[in-house]
Image (cartoon, helix red, strand yellow):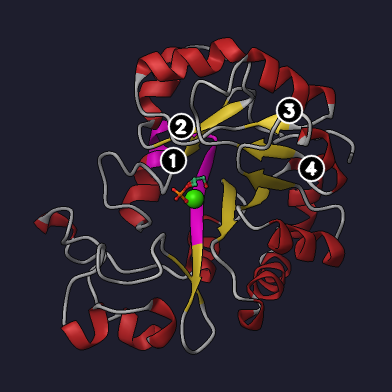
Amino acid sequence: AQAQSGPEAAAAPLVVAHRGASGTRPEHTFASYDHAIELGADYIEQDLQVTSDGVLVDMHDGTLNRTTRGDAANCTGAVNTKTLAQIKTCSAGSWFGAEYVNEKVPTLEELFQRYGNTVNYYIETKQPDPADHMEEKLLALLDKYNLRTASINNWQVLIQSFSADSLKTVHAMDPRLPLIFLGNPSLATIPSYADYAVGLGPSFGSSINANWVNTAHASCLDVHPYTINTVANMQAALAAGVDGMFTNFSDLLIGLLGDR
Ligand code: G3P
Ligand code: CA
């Protein structure tokens, strides 16, 4: 296991703004991230997709169908069949509310340009195809925006994935980077994730109890379950001893945590 570090400016339990303040703003837009930061979230979360011209964009789905509106030729279908220019013709906010019509799908680079080193990022390599070189592109952007060292030292960037292969690819490129494996491994297999990760992001449910969390902690793995949107479940996760959680409602969790 790597030495435990942690975000410099944040105290556990961490509030991870899942897709931004996505309970009240259109997910993965500047409006969503701006609001999450205003609310005081410790991290803003990004899901990565790759355009046909090789640009990392911040979208959950592999298709444009759910969260973009506009010319159907540009704004429906698989993200990786569209150029960035095509995607930029679409609204990423009008599906959520007319007042967000001007929101666009942000690139990861635009997020780094907008927020720089003033926020913590929790970035997911989403269903990465090795041919897309998502991991190399991500690390190149960390370097371009001087975020690699802050990631290593202060966990300013956490890289998460359901794909162990993707995390192992990042680990091979730089074993100092803090990585989070998304999934619900059995108690017996939890320790193996410490070979390359600093934490686990399980789907929250009854199996994520104090015993599960303690087992992770015994292997120096932090636990950040997703996606917890009710006070009752937030309280259950906190009682189990988690180190943070993903939520669409950062304000709800911040209110529950009070002074940290
Ligand atoms: O990354 C944690 C959580 O967001 C995983 O689920 O589908 O919302 O990316 P998903
Ligand atoms: Ca995610």
From which residue to which does the magenta span run?
A: 36-47
Give the x, y percent position of residue 219.
Answer: 84, 29
Q: What whole-number distance in Å separates the C-alpha atoms at marks 2 and 3?
A: 33 Å
- Asked if the residue under mark 2 is in contact with the one under mark 1, i.e. CB atoms within 8 Å, the reply is yes
Q: Secondary structure at mark 4?
A: helix
Q: What whole-number distance in Å separates the C-alpha atoms at marks 1 and 2?
A: 5 Å
Mark 4 or mark 1, earlier in chain: 1
Q: What whole-number distance in Å separates the C-alpha atoms at marks 4 and 1?
A: 31 Å
Q: On screen, 191 above or below 142?
A: above
Q: Which residue is mark 2?
A: 40
Q: Which residue is mark 3?
A: 187
Query: Toward which corner of the image does residue 250 lie, by quadrant?
Result: top left
Mark 2 or mark 3, earlier in chain: 2
- Asked if the residue under mark 1 is in contact with the one under mark 4, i.e. CB atoms within 8 Å, the reply is no
Name which residue lies at 41% across and 49% down: 19
Q: Which residue is mark 4?
A: 193
Residue type for callout 2: Gly
Give the number of the mark in front: 4 or 2.
Answer: 4
Res 138 seen here:
yes
Q: Secondary structure at mark 1?
A: helix
